[in-house]
Image (tube, grey):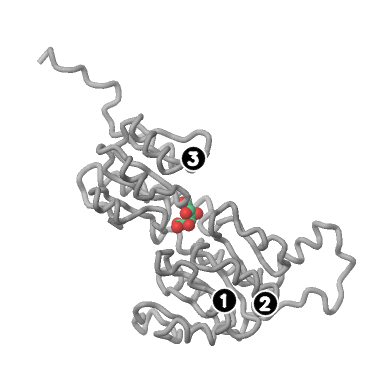
Amino acid sequence: DHLAEPPSADPRPVVLLTRRLPEAVEARASRDYTAILNPTDEALSGLAIAERAAAVKADAVLCCAGDRLDAAAIAALPERVRLLATFSVGTDHIDLAAAKARGLTVTNTPDVLTDATADIALLLILGAARRASEGERLIRADAWTGWTPTQLMGTHIGGKRLGIIGMGRIGQAVARRARAFGMTIHYSNRKRLPRELEEGAVYHSDPDALLAVSDVLSLHFPATAETRHWLNAERIERLPPGAILINTARGTVVDDQAIVAALRSGRLAAAGLDVFENEPNLFADYRDLPNSFLLPHLGSATVETRNAMGFKALDNIDAALSGREPPDRVV
Ligand code: 8YV
């Protein structure tokens, strides 16, 4: 009827992207939706995200791991928002219980980042064991006075035992790679894997028992209230002397003070860390240690992987906004 409201200029659903995403991802979002981009790449607080979602009348929010969507932020989200699609496999930045109570759908981006993250874990294992970052710093400081037979001798990883805590997709991908370098795999997981997926890895039902055989320990379990500071001083004592710690999971699962003390005393020979508590304001002492190999959360940072993560987040948004079951529903 002619008295009806004129249709708005753009009747497509509104999708708010909290961070700048790869060009191809933003292009697809803008093709299919009224996409509200963040041109500054600035991280917003949870409440600022909620405010922006209200201002633009968002139907879905495409968020990232640094966005702290705690209970207060979720409560502040306008009713209209039906979906939080996170551009990450980790969901520790979202209060899932609050999301569930509020009837929000939450989706993540598993699988597509498994290989990239496992590659970074191997880079950290090799870099930490072979003292790559010390060597690099020497050259950059113009302090290399020449090759010597005993300079920067590291540890051979072949023949060493790799302990993996959390044998999900990423843990298994790390095991496959490490095996190719001659490492023996030991693991701990809530459930033992079927034999065909174990590929000879030795299962330890008690993670504390796994520690005792981990020449290299790599963490691959989610950050939750229960796993906060899981690797503490007492557990470090269970590791073989001179063990190497690798973390590509979340900074909150380790106790920084205890790690730094162990790196200082040599109880840990080295640590390869891609994630930190309070990123980017990491525990400052890490920077001063020669035996810390530090990366700025690069686990999934390849063009291919970040595109695939963005497309997966959009696949979930497409499904949820058209009434289909999103493929990667977490809540
Ligand atoms: C991302 C990650 O770099 O997927 C995760 O959980 O930590 C990384 O892949 C980052 O979280 C992007 O949001």
Q: Secondary structure at mark 3?
A: loop
- Taking the view exactly as shown, the residue that stands out farthest to the left is 1
Instruction: Find disc 2 in the rendering and name its residue.
Output: 269
Q: Position of residue 69 (x, y in %)?
A: 39, 48
Q: Is residue 12 above or below residue 209?
A: above
Q: Secondary structure at mark 1?
A: helix
How far across and down, in percent of the image, does residue 156 sit?
67, 81
- Viewport quadrant of the N terminus: top left
Q: Earlier in the sequence, mark 1 or mark 2?
A: 1
Say which residue label 3 marks: 20
Nearer to the camera, 80 or 17: 80
Whether residue 13 can be seen here: yes
Q: Are marks 3 and 1 in contact (CB under 8 Å)?
A: no
Q: Residue at x 42, y 50 (%)?
A: 87
| Amino acid carrying mark 1 in the image | Ala
Nearer-the-camera pick, 67 or 255: 255
Q: Nearer the viewer, residue 216 or 179?
A: 216
Q: Residue furthest right?
A: 145
Q: Nearer the viewer, residue 119 or 36?
A: 36
| 161 lies left or right of 110 | right
Q: Which element carries disc 2, helix, strand or loop?
A: strand
Q: Is residue 182 visible?
A: no
- Do the numbered discs 1 and 2 sit on residues whose CB atoms are within 8 Å? no
Give the mark, 3 or 1, whose residue is nearer the N terminus: 3
Residue that label 1 marks: 233
What distance separates the C-alpha of mark 1 from that of mark 2?
Answer: 15 Å
Q: Position of residue 134 (x, y in %)?
A: 75, 66
Residue type, label 3 = Arg
Say if 226 sits above or below 305 in the image.
Answer: below
Q: CA separation, marks 3 and 1?
A: 39 Å
As measured in the structure, the alpha-carbon distance from the residue carrying label 3 to the one carrying label 2 is 38 Å
